[in-house]
Image (cartoon, rainbow, N blue to C red):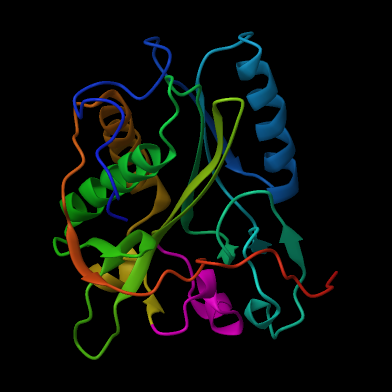
C-alpha cells in the first residue's frame, strides 16, 4: 500500500496515544473464536482507559476467516467451515506455522488508518528482508507484503494484514507465513486475489523458518515502526487492482 496522501503525523513521531511500553502476551496456539473474543474484551478495556496497549502473539489452529469484503466465489471448495470476521479485507486462512500478531492499541488523534497499516507493513518488510528475502516489498493497490515473481512463481504474498479500529483502538493485525502449509490456500481465492500466489519464508529461503525464529525480531520492528524509529519508505515494486475496491459484504450462506 502506498499512501494517497502524507500521513497526519511526522514520520518520526509515534502513532500511539501512549508512550508506555507495549505489553506483549504470548498465547501459543489459540483458537480463532476465543482470540477474537479476547481481543474484543481487551479493546473495550483499552478504549475505557483501564489498561495500556497490548500485543497478542499466537498461532491459530487451521481455520478460514472471511472479512467484510468476502465474495461468494472466494469461499472454500473443501467444505471446511468459515468464520465471518469484523475486519477489513476478504477471505484468508490461518494455521500452524504462521505467526499471528494482534496489536490492541489506542491510536493518537487524529486517527490515521492508512499510516497505521503502512507502519505494520514496514515492520513486516523489515523483518522479512533481514531474514533473507531481500526483494520483499509492496504492490500498489494491495495490502500486505509481497515477494516479486521469480523462478516461475508469480508475485506471492508472504504476509497479510486485516484490521479494525473502533473508538480509536485497533484490533486484528498481521499474519506472517513462516513454515505453514500452502495447501489450504488452494481451496479459496486468498484475499480475493486470483492473479497472484502465496508463499512462506521457508519456501523462499529453502530452509525451515519457524514462528519462534521470527517472533522477537518482528516484535522489535513493530515497536520501532509504531514509535517512528523505523520510518515508512517506498518499497513498491509493482501495481495491481485492489481486490476490495467497490465491494460490500456479499457472503453466501455457509456454516
Q: In the drawing, does residue 173 fall left or right of residue 122?
A: right
Q: Give the image quarter of residue 187.
A: bottom right
Coordinates of residue 130 in the picture (x, y in percent): 17, 50
Say which of 140 and 121 sits in front: 140
Q: Position of residue 6 (x, y in %)?
A: 24, 39
Q: Is residue 182 above or below residue 225?
A: below
Q: Quadrant of the N terminus?
A: bottom left
Question: Looking at the image, which residue is at 17% across and 56% down?
Answer: 235
Position above or below: 130 against 246: above
Q: Position of residue 210 (x, y in %)?
A: 38, 55
Q: Residue at x 50, y 25 (%)?
A: 105
How far across and how far down the image is residue 111, in percent?
Answer: 45, 28
Q: Which residues are magenta?
A: 179-195
Q: Is residue 208 at all visible to an observer of this figure?
A: no
How many numbered discs, if any? 0
Quadrant showing the C terminus: bottom right
Asked if residue 16 shows in the view, the reply is yes
Residue drawn at point x = 68 percent, y = 49 percent: 86
Q: Which quadrant holds residue 218? A: top left
Quarter of the image where one finds residue 51: top right
Amino acid at each position: 500500500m502506498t499512501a494517497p496522501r502524507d500521513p497526519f503525523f511526522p514520520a518520526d513521531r509515534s502513532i500511539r496515544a501512549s508512550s508506555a511500553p507495549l505489553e506483549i502476551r504470548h498465547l501459543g496456539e489459540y483458537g480463532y473464536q476465543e482470540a477474537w473474543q479476547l481481543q474484543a474484551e481487551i479493546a473495550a478495556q483499552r478504549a475505557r482507559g483501564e489498561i495500556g496497549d497490548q500485543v497478542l502473539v499466537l498461532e491459530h489452529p487451521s481455520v478460514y476467516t472471511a472479512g467484510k469484503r468476502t465474495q461468494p466465489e472466494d469461499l472454500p471448495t473443501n467444505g471446511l467451515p468459515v468464520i465471518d470476521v469484523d475486519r477489513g479485507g476478504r477471505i484468508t486462512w490461518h494455521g500452524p506455522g504462521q505467526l499471528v500478531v494482534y496489536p490492541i492499541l489506542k491510536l493518537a488523534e487524529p486517527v490515521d488508518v492508512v499510516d497505521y497499516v503502512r507502519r505494520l507493513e514496514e515492520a513486516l518488510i523489515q523483518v522479512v528482508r533481514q531474514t533473507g528475502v531481500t526483494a520483499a516489498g509492496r504492490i500498489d493497490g494491495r495490502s500486505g507484503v509481497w515477494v516479486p515473481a521469480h523462478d516461475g512463481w508469480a508475485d506471492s504474498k508472504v504476509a497479510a494484514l486485516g484490521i479494525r479500529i473502533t473508538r480509536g483502538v485497533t484490533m486484528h493485525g498481521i499474519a506472517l507465513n513462516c513454515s505453514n502449509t500452502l495447501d489450504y490456500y488452494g481451496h479459496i481465492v486468498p484475499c480475493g486475489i486470483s492473479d497472484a500466489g502465496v508463499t512462506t519464508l521457508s519456501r523462499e529461503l529453502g530452509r525451515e523458518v519457524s514462528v519462534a525464529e521470527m517472533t522477537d525480531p518482528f516484535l522489535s520492528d513493530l515497536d520501532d515502526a509504531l514509535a517512528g524509529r523505523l520510518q515508512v519508505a517506498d518499497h513498491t515494486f509493482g501495481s495491481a487492482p485492489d481486490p476490495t475496491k467497490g465491494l460490500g459484504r456479499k457472503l453466501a450462506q455457509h456454516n
